[in-house]
């Protein structure tokens, strides 16, 4: 077994690997860039080495620097995590040449599987089901058109070097093919420096289901069942689970056997994932093989009770797999939700800034009790433009899917992040969605369920009423504390009016020590909680149903977050509310007539010109930030007076982009 391992990564995955090193009594070596000087992985590792500027190409992507640190530190092996150099053929080659050990597959497996077209041909030759489509690189638009016709619309134009959901476009008909061809080529060129593309059939409403495999150097290959990763935005996973509600024993076995076959054929060792898409008839097709530890590996760990990082380390150190296929038992259900610094209300635009408040849900000791949060950040950290904006991976585990979902809902409702935009409410909204709960999901789920995009504002009577009850509870408890404290004669009103957007409720309240009774029309509702004024979270029982919310006092009311929404609830005494009807309405001030850049980034394209009339929602610019292209849309309608930026400009956050007349 190794004595010392270098971890060529950062963030949550570096921490994850360090944890297993500690468990195995292996000394861990971290590397860090300028931006990560004070980060968690540096603190947690036994040793750490500075490797350069924040820009990844000069630090985490510099194979020379990493190999150099490895030699200097005396580490015998390198774990690459995911992303960065994990699937870099030259890196692994270099490690092999230096006589160091790469904790992953042989470089040759990486080379073959790293290219989408090559791996597809390889898979087909190995007898694996592949998606119908072209088997060669398409060089010009005319060929693209011809092949698309042969394959039959809809088709997907894909970059062979693609990854991270980039470089792929759907063409529904002849008319789309030119656009799809060009965008795919452009994105591939700028993201991967490689513009080879191919075309395959676009499978409609498929599920993304992948098989985890483990292979040792003695020819033993096993699979650890499936993960369903159909909940995706921008073709990237945000919620994953294991097992899949779509997979029966027969399908699991079929998919498992093909994944094992492919691994054997390509001479694979270590942990790896064979990704498939599965259509509505349960026909499945090879998508790609990820020759590394997958982001969503925790859900497999939770249902198999195995430590995948440990298995990878043992395999790399030359041990034989201790488990056989028949030993693998799947227990319970696990779900992972990726917490990202991004704004789901603005097309998932990455958000940067300081984590002013970071309170993840309380994790019980050990994974068995059902909540696991793999994180790389701590309160006060900066989410920078340099790296992937993932904050953590929140996992829950239950005896069945329903229990895992209930725990996830509660955990999300208890997850407090302030200072940057994040997707907690969005994830929460998905988790409680009826279709999700019933398991009726596919890779278009988000587009189908949120056709107009996601909004965290309350849009239905049921939630508005629920939040009103909670707000009234908070209000009454604060008022009664004031009364006790000052022992004065202020009494809170017993008749209250709440206002949530356009929903208005008139409620009567009866405060008791331990609970609060609220009357609304003909119903009587009982609320119970241990909440104290100042607490950021409330666990509350409403007619014996339990809920958790994040709460914050605002002027005239409360901001309540949970169950997928975040909205302001205003509370008035009945008398004040009646009087307010007679107040003169304030003229709503027109929003400022400017559009600012929401994050630091590079202007890739300008889609408008001065003097042009714009409608709200029109596309204005494409800005590249955090390795993603973000479309900036107008939240104002009007005529453009002046444009302050041009293609190629680097903008700071809040820098003015345009001014309207
Ligand atoms: P997975 O199937 O494991 O989610 P993806 O193909 O979506 O894999 O991406 C692999 C992981 O690598 C992602 O989680 C992403 O955060 C990370 N990643 C993608 N691009 C980069 C990059 N340029 N640098 C570092 N990490 C990256
Ligand atoms: P990446 O390397 O970026 O992870 P993949 O080939 O794994 O690329 O595809 C990512 C996602 O894109 C899939 O999970 C699926 O949602 C979608 N996708 C890819 N190819 C197809 C296809 N032919 N038909 C339908 N969806 C597809
Ligand atoms: Mg993939």
Image (cartoon, rainbow, N blue to C red):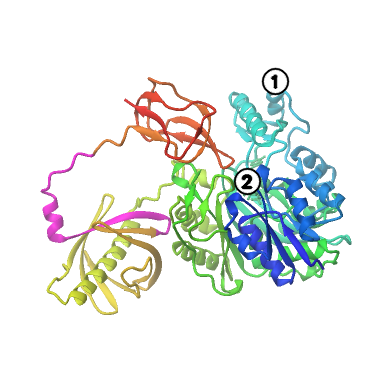
Residue 53's tag is 2
Q: Which residues are magenta?
A: 562-588
- Name above or below for residue 488 compared with residue 296: below
The N terminus - image quarter? bottom right
**Residue 570 belongs to the span the image colors magenta:** yes
Report the front residue among 56 and 484: 56
Report the front residue among 612 and 508: 612
The C terminus - image quarter? top left
Image point 54% across, 73% down: which residue?
A: 364
Image point 18% across, 42% down: which residue?
A: 586
Residue 574's image quarter? bottom left
Q: Residues within 10 Å of mark 1 (few under 14, many from 20)?
A: few
- 214 on left or right of 652: right
Q: Nearer the viewer, mark 2 or mark 1?
A: 2
Q: How many marks?
A: 2
Of the numbered discs 2 and 1, the one sitting upstream in the chain is 2
Q: Position of residue 611 (x, y in %)?
A: 37, 20
In the rendered image, is residue 245 in sight?
no
Residue 142's tag is 1
Q: Residues within 10 Å of mark 2 (few under 14, many from 20)?
A: some
**Residue 434 belongs to the span the image colors magenta:** no
Image point 72% across, 40% down: which residue?
A: 131
């Amino acid at each position: 077994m190794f004595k010392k391992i270098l971890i060529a990564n950062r963030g949550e995955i570096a921490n994850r690997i360090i944890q297993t090193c500690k468990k195995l009594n292996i000394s861990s070596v971290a590397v860090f860039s300028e931006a990560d000087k004070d980060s968690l992985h540096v603190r947690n590792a036994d040793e750490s080495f500075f490797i350069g500027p924040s820009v990844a190409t000069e630090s985490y992507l510099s194979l020379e620097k990493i190999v150099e640190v490895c030699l200097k530190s005396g580490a015998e092996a390198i774990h690459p995590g995911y992303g960065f150099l994990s699937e870099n053929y030259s890196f692994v080659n270099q490690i092999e040449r230096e006589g160091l050990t790469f904790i992953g597959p042989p470089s040759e497996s990486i080379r073959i599987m790293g290219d989408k077209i090559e791996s597809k041909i390889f898979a087909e030759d190995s007898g694996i089901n592949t998606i119908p489509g072209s088997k060669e690189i398409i060089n010009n638009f005319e060929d693209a058109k011809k092949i698309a016709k042969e394959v039959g619309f809809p088709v997907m134009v894909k970059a062979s070097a693609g990854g991270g959901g980039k470089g792929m476009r759907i063409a529904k008909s002849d008319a789309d093919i030119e656009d799809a061809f060009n965008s795919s080529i452009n994105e591939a060129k700028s993201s991967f420096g490689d513009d080879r593309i191919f075309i395959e059939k676009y499978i409609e409403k498929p599920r993304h289901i992948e098989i985890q495999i483990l292979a040792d150097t003695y020819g033993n290959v096993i699979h650890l069942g499936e993960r369903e990763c159909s909940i995706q935005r921008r073709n990237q996973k945000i919620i994953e689970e294991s097992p899949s509600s779509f997979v029966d024993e027969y399908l699991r076995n079929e998919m498992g056997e093909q994944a094992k076959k492919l691994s054997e054929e390509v001479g694979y060792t270590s942990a790896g994932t064979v990704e498939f898409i599965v259509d509505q008839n349960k026909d499945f097709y090879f998508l790609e093989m990820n020759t590394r530890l997958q982001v969503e590996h925790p859900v497999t760990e939770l249902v198999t009770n195995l430590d995948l990082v440990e298995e990878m380390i043992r395999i790399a150190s030359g041990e034989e797999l201790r488990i056989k296929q028949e030993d693998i038992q799947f227990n319970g259900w696990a779900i992972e939700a990726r917490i990202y610094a991004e704004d789901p209300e603005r097309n998932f635009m990455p958000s940067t800034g300081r984590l002013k408040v970071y309170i993840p849900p309380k994790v019980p000791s050990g994974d068995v009790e059902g909540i696991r949060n793999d994180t790389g950040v701590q309160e006060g950290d900066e989410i920078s433009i340099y790296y992937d904006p993932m904050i953590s991976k929140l996992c829950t585990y239950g005896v069945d899917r329903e229990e895992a979902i209930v725990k996830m809902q509660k955990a999300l409702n208890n997850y407090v992040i302030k200072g940057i935009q994040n997707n907690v409410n969005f994830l929460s909204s998905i988790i409680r969605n009826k279709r999700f709960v019933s398991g009726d999901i596919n890779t278009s789920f988000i587009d189908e369920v949120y056709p107009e995009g996601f909004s965290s504002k309350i849009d239905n009577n049921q939630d508005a009423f629920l939040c009103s009850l909670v707000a009234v509870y908070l209000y009454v408890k604060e008022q009664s504390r004031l009364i006790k404290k000052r022992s004065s004669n202020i009494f809170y009103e017993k008749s209250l009016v709440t206002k949530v957007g356009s929903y208005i409720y008139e409620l009567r309240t009866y405060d008791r020590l331990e609970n609060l009774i609220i009357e609304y029309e003909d119903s009587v509702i009982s609320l119970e909680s241990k909440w104290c004024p100042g607490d950021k979270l409330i666990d509350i029982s409403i007619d014996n149903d339990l809920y958790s919310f994040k709460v914050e006092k605002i002027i005239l009311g409360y901001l309540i977050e949970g169950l997928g929404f975040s909205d302001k609830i205003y509370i008035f005494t009945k008398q004040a509310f009646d009087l307010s009807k007679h107040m003169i309405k304030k003229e709503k001030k027109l929003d400022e007539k400017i559009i600012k850049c929401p994050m630091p980034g590079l202007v890739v394209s300008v889609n408008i010109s001065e003097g042009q009339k714009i409608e709200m929602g029109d596309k204005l610019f494409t800005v590249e930030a955090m390795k993603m292209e973000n479309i900036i849309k107008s939240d104002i309608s009007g005529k453009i007076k002046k444009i302050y930026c041009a293609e190629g400009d680097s903008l700071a956050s809040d820098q003015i982009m345009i001014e309207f007349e």
